[in-house]
Image: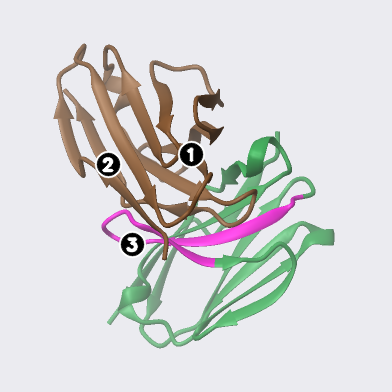
Chain colours: A brown, B green
Amino acid sequence: SQTIHQWPATLVQPVGSPLSLECTVEGTSNPNLYWYRQAAGRGLQLLFYSVGIGQISSEVPQNLSASRPQDRQFILSSKKLLLSDSGFYLCAWSVLSNTQYFGPGTRLTVL
Amino acid sequence: GIQVEQSPPDLILQEGANSTLRCNFSDSVNNLQWFHQNPWGQLINLFYIPSGTKQNGRLSATTVATERYSLLYISSSQTTDSGVYFCAVDYGGSQGNLIFGKGTKLSVKP
């Protein structure tokens, strides 16, 4: 069966520090991968998606970037964190354009 | 872009009560999903339902695509049903990307 992992689970970082969040999927090949952010107020916003290795599309301009160095690995990064980057970051996968399945999330606090 | 509106924003129920959550969307969609976000933040898939009706235990969902809405029914609610329920739609844009509503926060009291 398929599983999705995210780490770390929680992270507290100072403003201006770099960021690297990792997401890996097991049990499927060539999935679509997604990064979402959930800020206070509950809504989820799509940040990036990827349909293959090295293929990244951004949905909103921001202080973040994403990379997909391997088929089942998706990384969210920042060179310098802002206070507004705080939130709950969720990775998701799907096959083709079907049901999306979400990881456990990373709670990021920027101080 | 497509708008997804959920109602009510907040709902408080006594254990054992039934409830209906609504999701309206402003344009045609390829698919629609319902999720439950538990207190730990995990998003749990409930239904993949672009049209028609599905049931899973005490939960059921109906999507009327031609009228652009979906309903989630919770019967005989339990305290473990508490959390936030999200509706999300794929409007046929880039690669199945989902647009989420703001959710309905459900609190079930014992």
The disc numbered 2 marks a residue on which chain?
A
Tell me the subunit letter for badge 3. B
Asked if residue B43 is among those painted magenta in the image, a careful observer would answer yes
Residue at 34%, 56% in the rendered image: B42
Marks 1 and 2, how far apart in space?
14 Å
Indicate yes or no whether the magenta region holds residue B102: no
Q: In which quarter of the image is residue A27?
A: bottom left
Q: What residue type is labelled 1?
A: Tyr
Residue B28 lies, with reference to residue B35, above or below; the image says above
Q: Give the CA separation, mark 3 to mark 1.
A: 20 Å
| Residue annotated with mark 3 | B38
Please state the extent of the stretch shown in magenta in the rendering.
B29-46
Q: What residue type is labelled 3?
A: Asn
Quadrant in which the N terminus of chain B appears: top right
Which of discs 1 and 2 lies nearer the camera? The answer is 1
| Tags 1 and 2 touching, CB below 8 Å | no
Question: For the image shown, how many numbered marks are present on the structure?
Answer: 3
Q: How far apart are marks 3 and 2 (CA)?
A: 15 Å
- Asked if both marks, 1 and 2, belong to the same chain, the answer given is yes
* Percent coordinates x, y for residue A61 in the rendering: 50, 17
Task: Kindly identify which numbered label has been placed on residue A106.
Answer: 2
